[in-house]
């Protein structure tokens, strides 16, 4: 009798488990379908409004026109050349920000004296609207590559510094004491305890920094741009070519998503040792 009840309970539990799994699978499928359907619906309404004349091409070109323009710019090589120049600016500016942000965070996070000297000025600069500093950058560095790269570096350094500084400060002091007990020394503690412990925070800062890097570049390239995607947008603005402008903006957004995805892939690989919070 007891064995019969146990078998029935197991059957009911298995049925409930299968029902829950089926419900979750259906809800997941509906969620994916809804995420895909809403952008498609917006694009279709956009195309209909353009085709019926409700939306003037001077205000915004139609999706089909934008697609045709994108193919033409790719075939001519103009879009690839502009993208390569803009990408190089982001790479150089972000590399400067990464080195500076990590160095400043280590100085401020590992030393009380360094914190007193470094952190207050950076907190003050962080509160400033850095995009408004572009006129000063032009006065200081001219209208060449320096102000554009400088804006990217200046905007990106703060997320890297703040997240890494917070990550260093949040490391458990018991781990540091354990390292001292094992006679690791200062360099060993930094290498084996502090840097691995602060790595998740650094990767988050890199992701935020990259998003700000592309935002900074979009603004910086709108002023006296002689090359890059900003030059293409400037020429298109003068001739009211909204299709070209939208293509370049889509490329900016795509590059931002691509670089973020690259960092997330690195994050997943580098932090495999961490236990997952969610299944």
Image (cartoon, helix red, strand yellow):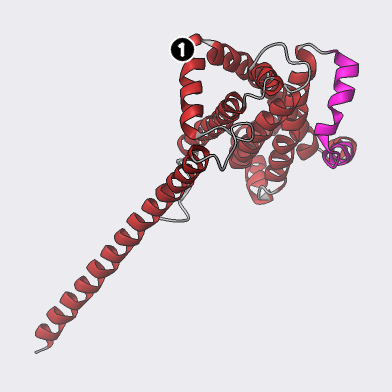
Compare residues 49 and 11 and report the one nearer the observer. Answer: 49
Residue placed at 46% from the left, 23% from the top? Answer: 68
- Expressed as whole percent of the image width and height from the top left, the position of residue 84 reads 58, 14
- Expressed as whole percent of the image width and height from the top left, the position of residue 29 reads 33, 55
Q: Within 10 Å of the Cα at label 1, are there few (<14), some (14-19), or many (20+) other Cα atoms?
A: few
| Residue pointed to by mark 1 | 75
Residue placed at 44% from the left, 48% from the top? Answer: 41
- Position above or below: 186 against 36: above
Decide if residue 132 is on the left or right side of residue 175.
right
Compare residues 28 and 10 and report the one nearer the observer. Answer: 28
Q: Is residue 193 visible?
A: no
Residue placed at 60% from the left, 29% from the top? Answer: 249
Q: How many marks?
A: 1
Name, please, the residue furthest toward the front.
53
Name, please, the residue furthest toward the bottom.
1
Query: Which quadrant of the figure has residue 236?
Result: top right
Helix, strand or loop at label 1? It is helix
Query: Which quadrant of the figure has residue 92?
Result: top right
- Position above or below: 279 against 55: below
Locate the C terminus and report the quarter of the image it occupies.
Answer: bottom left
- Expressed as whole percent of the image width and height from the top left, the position of residue 58 reads 63, 31
Q: Is residue 39 visible?
A: yes
- Expressed as whole percent of the image width and height from the top left, the position of residue 108 reads 80, 37
Looking at the rendering, the stretch of residues picked out in magenta corresponds to 119-142
**Is 69 contained in the magenta span?**
no
Locate the N terminus and report the quarter of the image it occupies.
Answer: bottom left
Decide if residue 18 is on the left or right side of residue 55.
left
Magenta stretch secondary structure, dominant:
helix
Compare residues 216 and 34 and report the one nearer the observer. Answer: 34
């Amino acid at each position: 009798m007891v064995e019969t009840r146990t078998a029935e309970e197991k059957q009911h539990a298995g049925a409930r488990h299968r029902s829950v799994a089926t419900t979750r699978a259906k809800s997941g499928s509906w969620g994916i379908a809804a995420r895909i359907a809403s952008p498609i619906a917006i694009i279709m309404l956009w195309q209909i409004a353009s085709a019926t004349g409700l939306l003037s091409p001077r205000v915004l070109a139609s999706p089909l026109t934008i697609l045709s323009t994108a193919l033409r710019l790719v075939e001519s090589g103009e879009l690839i050349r502009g993208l390569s120049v803009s990408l190089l600016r982001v790479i150089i500016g972000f590399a400067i920000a990464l080195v500076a942000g990590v160095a400043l965070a280590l100085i401020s996070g590992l030393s009380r004296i360094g914190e007193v000297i470094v952190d207050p000025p950076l907190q003050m600069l962080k509160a400033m609207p850095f995009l408004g500093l572009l006129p000063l950058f032009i006065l200081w560095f001219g209208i060449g590559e320096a102000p554009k790269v400088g804006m990217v570096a200046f905007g990106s350094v703060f997320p890297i510094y703040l997240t890494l500084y917070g990550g260093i400060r949040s490391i458990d002091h018991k781990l540091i004491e354990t390292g001292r007990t094992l006679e690791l020394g200062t360099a060993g503690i930094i290498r084996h305890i502090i840097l691995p412990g602060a790595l998740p925070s650094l990767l988050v800062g890199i992701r935020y920094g990259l998003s700000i890097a592309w935002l900074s570049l979009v603004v910086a390239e709108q002023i006296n741009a002689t090359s890059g995607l900003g030059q293409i947008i400037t020429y298109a603005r003068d001739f009211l070519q909204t299709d070209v402008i939208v293509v370049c903006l889509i490329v900016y957004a795509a590059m931002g998503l691509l670089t973020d995805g690259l960092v997330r892939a690195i994050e997943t690989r580098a932090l495999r040792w961490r236990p997952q919070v969610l299944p």
